[in-house]
Image (tube, rainbow, N blue to C red):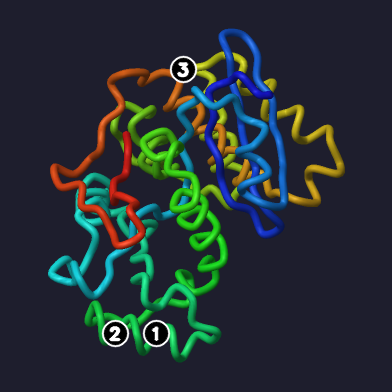
Amino acid sequence: MYKLTFGIDATRFGWVGAGIGKNTGEIYFNQKFADLIKKISSPSRILVDMPIGLSDKNIAFYPQRPCDTAARKLLGKKHSSIFSPPCIEALYKNNYADASRINFEVLGKKLSKQSWNIIPKIREVNAFLHLHPEWRGRILESHPELAFQYLNDNQNLLHSKKTKEGITERVQILKKHYPAAKSIFHTFLDVNALQKKANKDDIADALSLAVLNYTRGEKLRNISDKYPEDSLGNRMGIWL
């Protein structure tokens, strides 16, 4: 069982988890979200970069989730990294056209291709929490760009995470708050098998949530004053 503070990010091939302790940390990969969670000690609080709690026809008076609106305001010119997740009714459609049509009928907005591409991951997390309510309130949605901005003295970062400069910038920010972050990140570069399952920015994002989780402690808060519950029993909030 992992007994570390965790941040989790989705990759093309599964899920990467960054677990950190007082002076050490590890990077873990599992193809399925539930399999990764099974290896984490149950008292843990986990931050994950994936929408939790989705709008549906019964709460469609929120054209956007309150937490998404708050996140865009906090990120300012970087707000485009916050995309609108699908409504629950679109979540289990078999093709993009049907999902986008249903999303427009419920929320008044078509579904972006970015949202459609991660729908399987959104299903995994929200279904897991629906089936395992004991994890509600301990698996919380967060966002790496918000985490990095907070850890960077609330200043926007200068470089894209897809560039070499962006990765260097992010690792340096993490190192300021958690000195072992650089060595943990570089252990990923030494594991060829892991590199085939996750990109450098996936690792940086997972580490950012782990470091945020570790440093914020009991000060971690939902960025919105609204915390609505969806029809699956999951609540909408982004934690910072």
86 over 97 or under it: above or below: above
- The residue beneath circle 2 is 104
> Do residues under tags 2 and 1 come within 8 Å of each other at their CB atoms?
yes
Query: Picture coordinates of residue 181 (x, y %)?
Result: 60, 22
- How crowded is the residue under tag 1: few (<14 C-alpha within 10 Å), some, or many (20+)? many
Q: What residue occupies the far right of the structure in this picture?
A: 192
Instruction: Name the mark on residue 177.
Output: 3
Residue in the image at 71% along x and 49% along y: 198
Pick whichever, 117 or 164, lies toward us: 117
Query: Picture coordinates of residue 64 (x, y %)?
Result: 22, 65
Residue in the image at 45% along x and 20% along y: 214
Given the image, on which type of amino acid does mark 1 rest?
Answer: Ser
State the separation of the CA atoms marked 2 and 3: 42 Å
- How crowded is the residue under tag 3: few (<14 C-alpha within 10 Å), some, or many (20+)? some
198 over 22 or under it: above or below: below
Question: Mark 2 or mark 3, which has the lower sequence index?
Answer: 2
Q: Secondary structure at mark 1?
A: helix
Q: Secondary structure at mark 3?
A: helix
Disc number lying in front (2 or 3): 2
Q: Secondary structure at mark 2?
A: helix
- Side of 238 where 59 appears, left or right: left
Query: Picture coordinates of residue 36 (x, y %)?
Result: 66, 40
Query: Picture coordinates of residue 18 (x, y %)?
Result: 61, 32
Instruction: Name the mark on residue 37.
Output: none
Residue in the image at 64% along x and 53% along y: 11
Given the image, on which type of amino acid does mark 2 rest?
Answer: Phe
- The residue beneath circle 1 is 100
- Side of 134 where 37 appears, left or right: right
